[in-house]
Amino acid sequence: MPAPPDLVTLRPEGLYCPPGDFYIDPWRPVDRAVITHAHSDHARAGHGHYLAHSLSAGTLRARLGAAIPLQTLEYGEQLQHHGVRISLHPAGHVLGSAQVRIEHGGQVWVASGDYKLEADGTCAPFEAVRCDTFITESTFGLPVYRWPSQRELFDDIDAWWRANAAAGRPSVLLCYAFGKAQRILHGVDRSIGPIVVHGAVEPLNAVYREAGVDLAPTLRVTDPGVDAKLLRTALVLAPPSAQGTPWMRRFARHSDAFASGWMQLRGARRRRGVDRGFVMSDHADWPGLQQAIAATGAERVFVTHGSVATLVRWLREERGLDAQAFETEYGHGHEDEADGNAGSAA
């Protein structure tokens, strides 16, 4: 009996579902796009129709324009399109992030987008979805990548901030403006001092707050009362692109740090040229990838971006799965890259 046709194939525009005639996170303009989350490498401008989770609406409109033709679903809500059953399920990555489950002809495929297993309080926790074929990322698909727990991470950040405040110097923490910044604002000990954010961060804070996520109060450097005395005990959150810009010069004698999964590697910390590196990622680490893939029960796995060859080989040799690679254009401009609008924002 011949194998059923694949529910997702690779086209120049992106990952394509032939029976449903739609794409998942396409990197070129298409008529219909299902979007897993609003990071720039997965959600791009120019599509004729967008389908995403309802909690992605705010970030998608903030980044792609208020007028984008957007249809939303709740987690677990089902939609029939050309005979394909589509539903979205929590990915635990950022606000509104979703895995895409598609069912047709007796097959179930799940495209994960980006995901993380440990709950962080700023988005719905990852939910394993049983399927025949799983499309996974592998941003940190090497055994060296193993994340500290949420508690360990924030104990370290709080201790660094507290020590700097006691010494009367600002704590500048460089982090991605969408996802990591809000996770930090949710998790730090807000009793230590005031928190000041870069102009690239605050619009996304507003979206999270509107969605009901508890974030610490924040200030902009232009707000009344933000002066040299206040800044001496402040935690300052800024995107990586702010490093070395005139915006940073107002924080005299500051200590700086970088929050990223890449901080697991000593060389990455040294290249960043900061005082501290905090290992923090919104992606699954090596044990997390293994756990998530196993939990799906999938016998076929496609690996999209990151350490693709390593994960494919491991899945074949250690798990006996039918693992293959999808050559995609994901993974650029997210984990530790700069926001393009960061340089002079107040």
Image: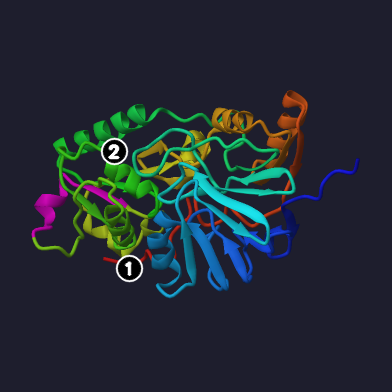
Q: Secondary structure at mark 1?
A: loop
Does the magenta segment cover residue 231? yes
> Which residue, given by chain and number where applicable, does mark 1 sit on?
344
Q: Nearer the viewer, residue 23 or 338?
A: 23
Q: Residues within 10 Å of mark 1 (few under 14, many from 20)?
A: some
Is 256 magenta? The answer is no
Which residue type does callout 2 highlight? Gly
Circle 1/circle 2 CB separation < 8 Å:
no
Q: Residue at x 27, y 53 (%)?
A: 209
Q: From the viewer's side, name the closer residue of 63 and 231.
A: 63
Q: Is 77 left, or right, of 242 in this rendering? A: right
Q: Nearer the viewer, residue 77 or 211?
A: 77
Taking the spot 31% from the left edge, 30% from the top edge, the residue there is: 156
Q: How many marks?
A: 2
In this view, the mark in front (1 or 2)? 2
Coordinates of residue 71 in the picture (x, y in percent):
48, 64
| In front of the other: 292 or 154 | 292
Q: Which residue is mark 2?
A: 187
Q: Identify the residue shown where x is 14% and y is 35%.
A: 166
Magenta range:
225-237
* Most distant residue in the top direction: 318
Is 47 above or below relative to 26? below
